[in-house]
């Protein structure tokens, strides 16, 4: 009978520790992640079943950069622009970002970006027309999409078979 090596004992100890603490439901999937070209590769979970898989998602820093760009584009400096012109500028940014980050599980990121862009555009429209409230009743999603032509990123995931959630 051979004695176990120190390395195998350490692996067993960390697996038992993780199981006892409840930190990892699925210890067979590696915990390591790495970034490459703006994507984070590592553990992802399926939306309905919670089953883990190794996948990719846009790095949070890149989502933050897009949100800062949208915030800059909807600042008070651009109140002189027409609404259609402003939406055209936003659409170019959104479509370019979405084309770069179209691989992997992007549905949640797209929904978050859509919500943020809609709220910033409503705020910009309220400042432009000097309205004091949040503008949800005056500028609903249907107005932003149908009248002004704002691109909705979450609709773009319908054509991506691996991004359906």
Image (cartoon, rainbow, N blue to C red):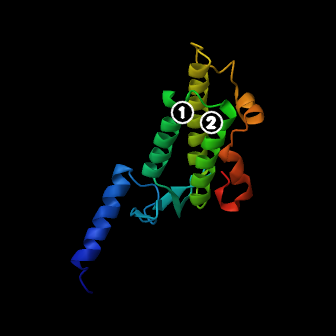
Q: Residues within 10 Å of mark 2 (few under 14, many from 20)?
A: many
Q: Quadrant of residue 164?
A: bottom right
Q: Where 110 falls versus 3 (above or below)? A: above
In the picture of the structure, the residue carrying the numbered disc 1 is: 74
Quadrant containing the N terminus in the rendered view: bottom left
- Measured from the top left, where is residue 106 in percent x and y? 59, 53
Q: Residue furthest bottom?
A: 1
Q: Which residue is found at the position 54% from the left and 33% from the top?
A: 74
Q: Which residue is found at the position 65% from the left and 46% from the top?
A: 153
Asked if the residue under mark 1 is in contact with the one under mark 2, i.e. CB atoms within 8 Å, the reply is: yes
Residue 55 has which mark?
none
Q: Is residue 158 left or right of residue 7?
A: right
Mark 2 lies on a secondary structure that is helix
The residue nearer to you, when weighing 20 against 58, is: 58
* Label 2 vs 1, first from the N-terminus: 1
The residue nearer to you, when weighing 105 against 155, is: 155
Q: Quadrant of residue 137?
A: top right
Tally of numbered discs = 2
Q: Which residue is found at the position 57% from the left and 42% from the top?
A: 113
In the picture of the structure, the residue carrying the numbered disc 2 is: 86
- Measured from the top left, where is residue 140 in percent x and y? 70, 25
Q: Which residue is found at the position 39% from the left and 50% from the top?
A: 22
Q: Quadrant of residue 151?
A: top right
């Amino acid at each position: 009978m051979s004695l176990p090596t120190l390395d195998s004992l350490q692996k067993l100890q960390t697996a038992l520790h993780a199981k006892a603490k409840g930190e990892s439901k699925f210890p067979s999937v590696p915990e390591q992640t790495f970034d490459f070209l703006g994507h984070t590769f590592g553990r992802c979970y399926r939306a309905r079943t919670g089953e883990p898989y190794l996948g990719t998602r846009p790095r949070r820093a890149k989502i933050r950069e897009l949100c800062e760009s949208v915030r800059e584009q909807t600042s008070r400096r651009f109140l002189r622009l027409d609404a259609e012109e402003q939406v055209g500028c936003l659409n170019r940014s959104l479509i370019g970002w979405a084309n770069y980050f179209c691989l992997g599980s992007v549905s949640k990121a797209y929904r978050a970006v859509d919500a943020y862009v809609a709220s910033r555009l409503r705020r910009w429209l309220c400042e432009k027309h000097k309205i004091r409230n949040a503008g949800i009743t005056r500028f609903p999603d249907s107005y932003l999409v149908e009248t002004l032509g704002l691109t909705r990123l979450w609709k773009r995931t319908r054509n991506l078979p691996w991004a359906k959630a």
